[in-house]
Amino acid sequence: MLSTENIITQVKRSVQLLSATYIVLFGLLFTITMISGYYNIPISSFTRDPTVVLGGPSYIGFISNIGILFWAFTAAICLFSSVIHKQGNNQATSQFLLYSGLLTLWLLLDDMFMLHDSLLPNHLMIPEKLVYLGYVTIVLVYLVKFRTEILNHEYATLFIAFSFFALSVLADLLLEQQGFEFLLEDGLKLFGIVTWFIFFFRTCRVYLQREGV
């Protein structure tokens, strides 16, 4: 029912979360403003769509954007399910889903901002092969730590996802980056991302069904 009292109550319930969120967003915009002024970069380069800034057609990065959407879907599902299980005092499951969500979120950021392709090797002088090695190490630690949770579900699907990722990395390292090779590398990665999403979607659905959600 719409009423002044009801609106005030809703605002009071949300004020802490909204305040924290707005502070983070304000900090982000302030940081962008400082970087823009220091490096003499137009503000629009940070705020507008890349294809608009660069004057490119709207289909630029189409496959990459589809992959980023599926990274985001997976991260959101895992992190939301983690909160549900934490409230139910199921700490092992909650931790597995939390770390899965954070790992997916990092992979999303890597894909979106080209961390291993450009930022880390070109600006921080970390070789791309060393970055790949670091990622492999993180994933192996993750698999060992949560092997029980993973083996209790459709781990074959997760294995297929990792296989696609591995083939994509090999294509990146071994093939010349031109023409069909781009389709092969990025296509394999897209298959991996969607398979990754399917594994965690089905896993989270099972967990939530057990919680009666």
Image (spheres, rainbow, N blue to C red):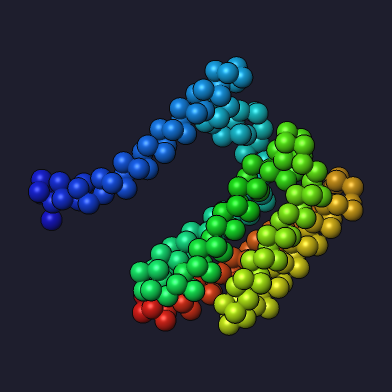
Residue 190 x %, y %: 69, 58
Which of these two is toward me, 59 or 182?
Answer: 182
Q: Residue 1 vs residue 68: left or right?
A: left
Can you say whether 68 is above or below 203 in the image? above
Residue 62 seen in the current view: no
Location of the C terminus (image quadrant): bottom left
Location of the N terminus (image quadrant): bottom left
Can you say whether 128 is above or below 74 in the image? above
Residue 132 seen in the current view: yes
Residue 55 x %, y %: 65, 28
Q: Residue 123 vs residue 12: left or right?
A: right
Residue 63 x %, y %: 67, 51
Q: Quadrant of residue 159?
A: bottom right
Q: State the residue at coordinates (77%, 37%).
A: 125
Residue 156 x %, y %: 68, 78
Can you say whether 186 is above or below 153 in the image? above
Which of these two is toward me, 67 or 33?
Answer: 33
Q: Residue 154 vs residue 188: left or right?
A: left
Q: State the residue at coordinates (21%, 46%).
A: 11
Q: Residue 101 vs residue 139: left or right?
A: left
Can you say whether 200 is above or below 41 in the image? below
Q: State the residue at coordinates (64%, 66%).
A: 142
Q: State the residue at coordinates (67%, 32%).
A: 56
Count of labels in the image: 0
Q: Quadrant of residue 49?
A: top right
